[in-house]
């Protein structure tokens, strides 16, 4: 595969670059309050949609543009390059799950408002005792007439506070083997019995939440797929979390590397061997991420769906995020530690989060070991 832009891709990139320069909201990083963040998420999604930049790779019959995954990669790359607000990532992975498992009626009902941003979604998989071991989830759904009655708790649900609906995994058959008794319900977060309690992260933002469900009634029509399809559906969703987005992470890492290098030059420490080593490590980790992202992208372009090898991308990305954060400390020294308002220190702390969400580093290594046919650990 030739990784250089084709003339059409190059034209798309230049038009997008000019559009981003005009439209990225100034000072969005300073919006910290809940209502402001909710509005930002929705309005940025709508702005992108109106300009034709949402659903580039979605099938035309679902309202997308049916373009190759390369275009989504270009969007991720250019948006990260100028530090735009987060792209509506639910489109790329939650949307794939809905599009893949929904009935025709559900597609007509749920996909258009998901695409245009009118309805924001979050992913309710993890529970207090079911993160790495997701199949151990215990939120229970019992059929009662035309509804499921749901009781249980989700945790770490990203953006739940700013979302309208949730892709919720529940246990419908407690007697079946644990991977088989799981079902997915499309759940409105304003249903009676749902409480969303924010989890304040180290950066002061309420971007994660606990979601409590007490006797919540969800109509059977909101079931996605059949009873027992939940595990398969969850695996489809997480496999789409990786891919074009990796190209965007790479852009972010390179932008940060550039900032640290400038800082080191300003401090006169560019000749310091520890600093040089740290910066070189970031560059090498970024290069590994680039090669893997390019390879994964070439598979997507050939129409191959993502699989467990996405774990390699997650591992490389976490590693690069750690390296860039450590390099920051090497350049700035101990003075940047302990000051929570320092944006570099905040980035350092966030790099620890990267190696947990979307599956921890240890779990990614276990998956890769299985891909390599290595013996299972205890
Ligand atoms: C900021 C943030 C956002 C998140 N967003 C979402 C979201 O939107 N939706 C959602 O459903 N979930 C979300 N999560 C949850 C995330 O997927 C889990 O936190 C993650 O899978 C780890 O699960 P856990 O927290 O239960 O830790 P545990 O599973 O308890 O793991 C604890 C430690 O033990 C290690 N470990 C566990 N099992 C093994 C093993 N078999 N072999 C080796 N080591 C092991 C882990 O690597 C980890 O270091 C988010 C988490 C965070 C921190």
Image: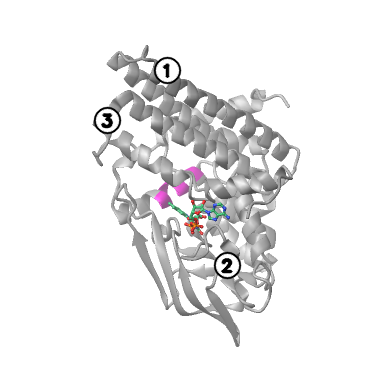
* Quarter of the figure with residue 196: bottom left
| Picture layout, residue 347 above or below residue 364 | above
Q: Which residue is mark 2?
A: 136
* Residue 25 at x, y percent in the picture: 36, 39
Query: Could you say where residue 23 lies in the image, as x and y percent from the top left?
Result: 41, 36
Q: Which residue does the numbered mark 1 point to in the structure image? A: 276
How many numbered marks appear? 3
* Outermost residue, front side: 378
Residue hosting label 3: 334
**Foreground residue among 335 and 230:** 335
Q: Quadrant of the N terminus?
A: top right
Which residue: 40% across, 36% down? 24
Specify which label sits upstream in the sequence, 2 or 1.
2
182, above or below 285, in the image: below
Question: Label 1: few (<14), some or many (≥20) within 10 Å?
Answer: some
Tell whether label 3 touches label 1 (CB within 8 Å). no
Q: Secondary structure at mark 3?
A: helix
Q: Answer whether labels 2 and 1 touch (C-beta < 8 Å).
A: no
Gap between marks 2 and 1, in whole Å? 45 Å
Residue 80 in sight: no
Residue 214 x %, y %: 44, 79
Q: Position of residue 56 (x, y in %)?
A: 61, 42
């Amino acid at each position: 595969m030739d990784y250089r832009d084709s003339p059409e891709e190059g034209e798309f990139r230049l038009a997008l670059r000019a559009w981003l320069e005009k439209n990225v909201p100034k000072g969005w990083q300073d919006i910290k309050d809940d209502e402001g963040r909710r509005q930002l998420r929705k309005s940025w999604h709508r702005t992108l949609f109106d300009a034709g930049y949402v659903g580039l790779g979605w099938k035309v019959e679902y309202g997308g543009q049916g373009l190759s995954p390369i275009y989504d990669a270009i969007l991720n790359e250019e948006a990260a390059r100028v530090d735009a607000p987060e792209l509506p990532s639910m489109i790329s992975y939650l949307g794939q799950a809905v599009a893949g498992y929904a009935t025709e009626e559900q597609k007509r009902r749920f996909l258009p408002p998901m695409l245009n941003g009118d309805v924001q979604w979050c992913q309710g998989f993890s529970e207090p005792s079911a993160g790495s071991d997701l199949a151990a989830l215990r939120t229970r759904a019992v059929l009662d007439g035309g509804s499921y009655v749901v009781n249980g708790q989700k945790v770490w649900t990203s953006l739940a506070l700013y979302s309208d609906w949730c892709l919720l995994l529940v246990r419908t058959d407690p007697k079946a083997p644990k991977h088989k008794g799981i079902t997915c319900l499309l759940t409105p977060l304003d249903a009676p019995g749902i409480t969303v309690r924010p989890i304040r992260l180290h950066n002061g933002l309420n971007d994660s939440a606990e979601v409590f469900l007490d006797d919540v009634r969800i109509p059977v029509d909101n079931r996605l797929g059949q009873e027992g399809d939940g595990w398969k559906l969850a695996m489809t969703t997480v496999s789409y979390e990786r891919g074009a987005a990796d190209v965007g992470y790479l852009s972010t890492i390179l932008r940060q590397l550039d900032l640290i290098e400038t800082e080191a030059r300003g401090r006169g420490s560019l000749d310091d061997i520890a600093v040089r080593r740290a910066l070189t490590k970031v560059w090498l980790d970024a290069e590994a991420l680039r090669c893997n992202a390019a390879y994964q992208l070439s598979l997507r372009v050939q129409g191959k769906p993502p699989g467990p090898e996405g774990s390699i991308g997650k591992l490389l990305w976490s590693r690069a995020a750690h390296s860039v954060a450590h390099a920051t400390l090497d350049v700035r020294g101990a003075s940047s530690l302990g000051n929570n308002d320092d944006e570099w220190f905040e980035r350092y702390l966030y790099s620890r989060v990267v190696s947990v969400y979307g599956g921890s580093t240890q779990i990614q290594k276990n998956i890769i070991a299985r891909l390599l046919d290595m013996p299972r650990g205890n």
